[in-house]
Image (cartoon, rainbow, N blue to C red):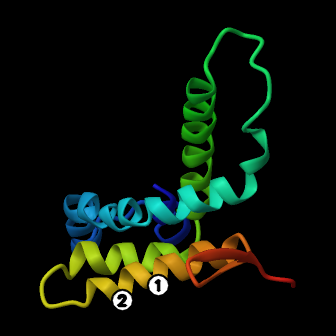
Amino acid sequence: SIYNYNHNPMGLEDDFILDLRKKIGHGKALLDQNYDILAAVYRFYHSDNQLEFQWDGRSHMERYDEEWKNKYKEWIAVLSQSKDIQRPIIKFATQREGFNHDFLKATIRRSILGHFKLRIRSQKLFKVSA
């Protein structure tokens, strides 16, 4: 995993790593909860392809579905390398009970929007000038 590569390059198996391996699937739920924000980012950047002609026999929905799935996998691979996203996932996975999960979800959401240099205001995405 990216976390092991960055933080445990020797592959040492201490109690924390063993515990994390057992529970990390629960932490991925935070990314699933932020699926909607990634979908909104995709629509923000790819809203101009709605009326293109399809010459390969696929419908617009089939093309959009394929492109979206590929982009989602690409973004997850990139975003999972960010410490700002790794930390909340690890906290959620290892400290599931008695922890403010909404805060962790919001932290990841902020990190995703920051990665794409976007902000949400009044339920609309806006590009942030850097």
Residue under the point 73% across and 50% down: 47
Give the alpha-carbon distance from disc 2 to disc 1, as whole Å: 6 Å
Q: Which image quarter: residue 56? A: top right
* Cβ–Cβ under 8 Å for marks 2 and 1: yes
- Residue position marked by numbered label 1 in the rendering: 107
Furthest residue toward left: 97
Would residue 110 appear left or right of 31 to someone viewing this image?
right
- Residue position marked by numbered label 2 in the rendering: 103
Q: Secondary structure at mark 1?
A: helix
Residue under the point 27% across and 71% down: 14
Would residue 98 appear left or right of 115 to someone viewing this image?
left
x, y percent for residue 39: 54, 56
Residue under the point 26% across and 67% down: 20
Nearer to me, 23 or 114: 114
The C terminus sits in image quarter: bottom right
x, y percent for residue 26: 24, 63
- Hey, what amino acid is under mark 1? Thr
* Tally of numbered tags: 2
Would residue 118 appear left or right of 87 to someone viewing this image?
right
Residue under the point 76% across and 39% down: 49
x, y percent for residue 58: 63, 15
Q: Which image quarter: residue 29? A: bottom left
Residue 2, compared with residue 100, is above or below; it is above
x, y percent for residue 36: 46, 61
Nearer to me, 34 or 124: 124
